[in-house]
Image (cartoon, helix red, strand yellow):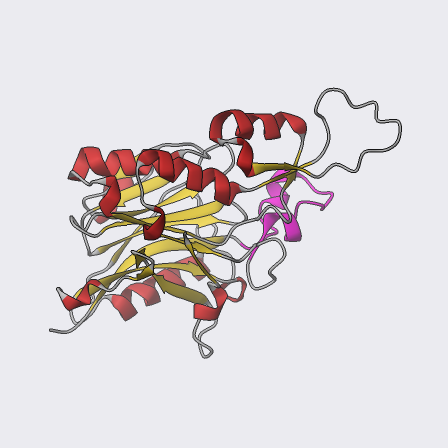
Amino acid sequence: MICLVDVAQAAKPNDYKYALVPFYKNGAPYDASQDQNARPLWGMTLLAAGSMRFRWNETNPNRDKFLAGLCQKFGGPSGNKSIVPLELIHSQKVLEARAAGDTQGLQGDGIITQNAALVPVVTAADCVPIYFYDSKTGAFGAAHSGWKGTGIAARVVQEMARVYGSKPQDILVAIGPHIHDCCYIVDGERAKYFTDNFGGDCVKDVRVKPEHDSDQNGGGLYALSLLRANLNCLAAAGVLEENIVAASNCTSCDGRFGSFRRQAAALDVHQEQKSRLFTTQAAFVIIEQRES
């Protein structure tokens, strides 16, 4: 059974801008510091931190200031952390980063690395942030899984195996806050796509059928669980259920998080303007350095 956590509760009361959560191994929080002077953590900014929107052709001083402070705080005595950003395209494209500039100008939806000085960062606002850590090789990464990119979780596992020799049973995975099936209602076409590709258990028919229902083409309403779809992907990739932790938070109904659906989806404005009216969050993996 996977472990569920309330991510917002992990935020410190005096700094309610982000939360950091440990990975889980064998159903318990994982702390590698018993063997080395570092531990992997996965995190996400909250609504209070403001927008972490990222585009290569834009500037975001709020994001820059926050991430610089994060690197300084968790860089240890040397303070040698560097952000690795990526402009998202709702794909299954995963990039490797050996140095801070390796993703410069590139687009994709996943970043993997073995360099503990790097902080891979993706963004999310209802889409699923997914975090990875190999407890044997020390490789780690972060991915953005929008509905179009569902399956990237398995792709990251495959890439970690190819690049670093990772074994699926050694990879710890965290699934961050995202829109849950309580709020994510889709049409028949999308429901069929997920049923066909990720299993029927990730879709539930929630139609209220009138007495004379003329809908014969599956165009009704269905609740879609992106969590279940990603868990099915991870299981197929060989990741152990006891090594997975997932956020219980639904970004759409939990006001502590930014949400496209809650903040902008219903607004009658141009799509580009709409894209700036919700609070995009930063999702990242950071290796906390400790003094010897």
Q: Is 15 situated above or below 50?
A: below
Q: Residue furthest top?
A: 216
Q: Is residue 13 magenta?
A: no
Query: Is residue 228 left or right of 87 when viewed as pictured?
Result: right
Q: Residue furthest right?
A: 212
Q: Is residue 268 magenta?
A: yes
What is the x, y in percent for residue 25? Answer: 29, 56
Range covered by the magenta-colored residues: 258-279
What is the x, y in percent for residue 215? Answer: 79, 23
In front: 191, or 131? 191
What is the x, y in percent for residue 283? Answer: 40, 53
Measuring 71% from the left and 46% from the top, which residue is drawn there?
267
Q: Is 36 situated above or below 202?
A: below
Query: Is residue 60 left or right of 251 when viewed as pictured?
Result: left
Residue 228 visible in the picture? yes
Q: Quadrant of residue 238?
A: top left
Measuring 23% from the left and 39% from the top, which residue is drawn there?
160
Q: Give the number of callouts.
A: 0
Q: Residue furthest front?
A: 1
Measuring 56% from the left and 48% from the top, which residue is drawn there?
179
Residue 108 visible in the picture? no
Q: Is 8 situated above or below 246?
A: below
